[in-house]
Amino acid sequence: MPDPGDWERKKARKKGKAASPSSSMPGTVPAQPAGTNPWESAAATLKAQQQTTPTPSAPASKAEPATPWATVDEKSSTAALRKLGRGVLWGVVGLAVITGVRSWIIPNQSDAPPPAAVKTAPAYPSDAAQAAAARFARAYLTWNEDDQDARAAALAALLPKDSDTDAGWDGRGRQDVLTVQPGAVTPTTQGQARVRVDVLLHTTEEAGTPAEGKKKATPAKTADRWIGLEVPVVHTAGQVVVTGAPGMVGLPASGPTLPDLKAPESDATFAQQTEGTVSAFFKAYAGGDTGAVTAPGATIPPVPAGMTLVGVTSWAADAGTGTDRTGTARVMWKVGEAQIEQTYQVELTRVASADAERWQVVDVHGGAA
């Protein structure tokens, strides 16, 4: 800043002069009277200059382009839901890392719960029912008017306690049971069932009275016959017992119709090649020594005593290949004074040696099945 003394001296030299045209221009500093503090005068002059100097206007700001959307303040509930969604998403990602995504797509079969057990009713004890019915049929159909207590004792062991051991018999006659064959068991209700038993009876018919004028009576006759018997039983306390009197039923006149069974194809050439082998086997079979005509290691017991071979009536080999073959033989046997033809399924195997090979019997079964 210039020295105030110099400044005052310059002002004094100009005192008295006419004001110059430029003094009226804006920004001209007026002269200060004498005796004024130079520091105050300088401050006043600086202030006057600042007031008279035009303040440059700020450059006009560029107009901002209009915003195509309006800004809306986000609600607090929306922000909370967004944060919750992010948390759930990260939780799922973490669970996938721990358990493995594959276990979600293809579950582990070993982790699957076992299927629920299906409760089924226990099967009826058919074997026990057949045994009880067979014993009862033998005791029930055996009687002797000379020994009535034997039948009563046999029935008492099979019927419920305090049952009538007469079981409908009038105490007369004589009959024996030769054999019993239990059959079908048909369950009904309340643990009960009906058991079919086929019985072979030997019955003694009553002797006839002497005809008028004759001393000898007609001799008693005997007869053997099959009958059917249906026995009611009940399963209780872990065992099967007869509940009451049975009923005699008839036997079917014929068996059921067979299904359409397909016969195997035959090989006539192989049958002709092995016909002598099969005939030699059955001769040895009837004689009781099959070791020479059977394959090594085969053991075939001989036929029962009393059977004499008449001959092999037919031999048909089944079609096939390989070292093991089968076929069907029809054989006529003599039993006592009668002859009877029977059917056998014969199994053959090929046995080879250094010199040759041959077919030998390895096993034989009754029937063609």
Image (cartoon, helix red, strand yellow):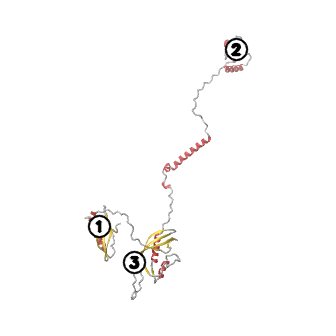
Task: Give x and y (percent) for residue 165.
Answer: 50, 78
Residue 97: numbered disc: none
Q: Left or right: 162 with respect to 250?
A: right
Name the residue type under label 1.
Trp
Q: Is residue 226 visible?
A: yes
Q: Earlier in the sequence, mark 2 or mark 3?
A: 2
Label 3 – label 1 distance at C-alpha:
38 Å
Name the residue type under label 2.
Lys
Location of residue 333 with respect to 259 vertically, above or below: below
Q: Residue at x 69, y 18 (%)?
A: 4
Q: Which residue occupies the extreme front position in the image?
A: 212
Q: Which residue is mark 3?
A: 224
- Crowding at label 2, few (<14), some or many (≥20) Cα neighbours within 10 Å? some
Looking at the rendered structure, the secondary structure element under dot 3 is: strand
Q: Left or right: 326 with respect to 72?
A: left
Q: Earlier in the sequence, mark 2 or mark 1?
A: 2
Q: Quadrant of the N terminus?
A: top right
Q: Which residue is mark 2?
A: 11
| Residues at circles 2 and 3 in contact by the CB criterion of under 8 Å | no
